[in-house]
Image: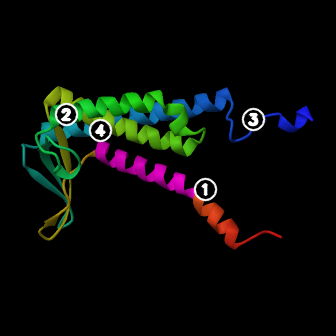
Amino acid sequence: MAEKFKVDVNSEHYPTASTQSRHLITTLVLSLVIVVLDQVTKHAIRYSLSLGESKAVISSLFDLTYVRNTGAVWGSLQHQNEWLAVVSIMVLVLMALFYRYLAGGRMIFSAALGCIMGGITGNLIDRIKLGWVTDFLDFYWNTSHWPSFNIADSAICIGVGLYLLASLRPALKMKSDRHNPVN
């Protein structure tokens, strides 16, 4: 009878300590790579372009344009740099405190968290060091421009997208299983 209630600690629902360590290392390494890439590209833009200057990469579609953003994503919350820095720190602390819960023992969640944490950290460094975030990726069609962004912003969006897709996957599988029962 006791065998019936024995928990298999090696199942995918209960990852081993070595699996958890690999996931955490993945999160930290991915986060570090994103921060380094983000900071190197922002430095290159600040060094090679004047504020507001653009260099065409793909004519009528994509330029590198040096922009200073004191707000949040897509230019919202302008001139809220200090408040956004505090919120960024709080989010990073909460993500670190609840990492095991957020990662859920799944590599996809660990990678998503690495993207999000790396992106937040990259922009936080700018906020603290410069008082603004350097944006430079400028996509447009004719005269319609998407708001400029950077590597950190991209990483945050990719991380959130991955996390949401991975979160939806079990629900979609359950729905599929109900419509296609196995005999």
**Horizontal placement of 68 versus 173: left or right?**
left
Dots 2, 4 in contact, CB < 8 A: no
Secondary element at image label 3 = loop
Residue receiving disc 3: 10
In which quadrant of the rendered view does residue 121 lie?
top left
Residue receiving disc 2: 83
Residues drawn in magenta:
151-170
Give the mark nearer the N terminus: 3 vs 1: 3
Q: Is residue 148 above or below residue 83?
A: below
Between tags 4 and 3, which lies in front? 3
Dots 1, 2 in contact, CB < 8 A: no
Between tags 1 and 4, which lies in front? 1
Most foreground residue, 94 or 147:
94
Task: Give the spatial CA distance, label 1 vs label 4.
Answer: 33 Å
Examine the structure image and report whether residue 165 is included in the region drawn in magenta.
yes
Task: Give the spatial CA distance, label 2 vs label 3.
Answer: 43 Å
Secondary element at image label 2 = helix
Residue receiving disc 1: 170
Type of the residue with mark 3: Asn
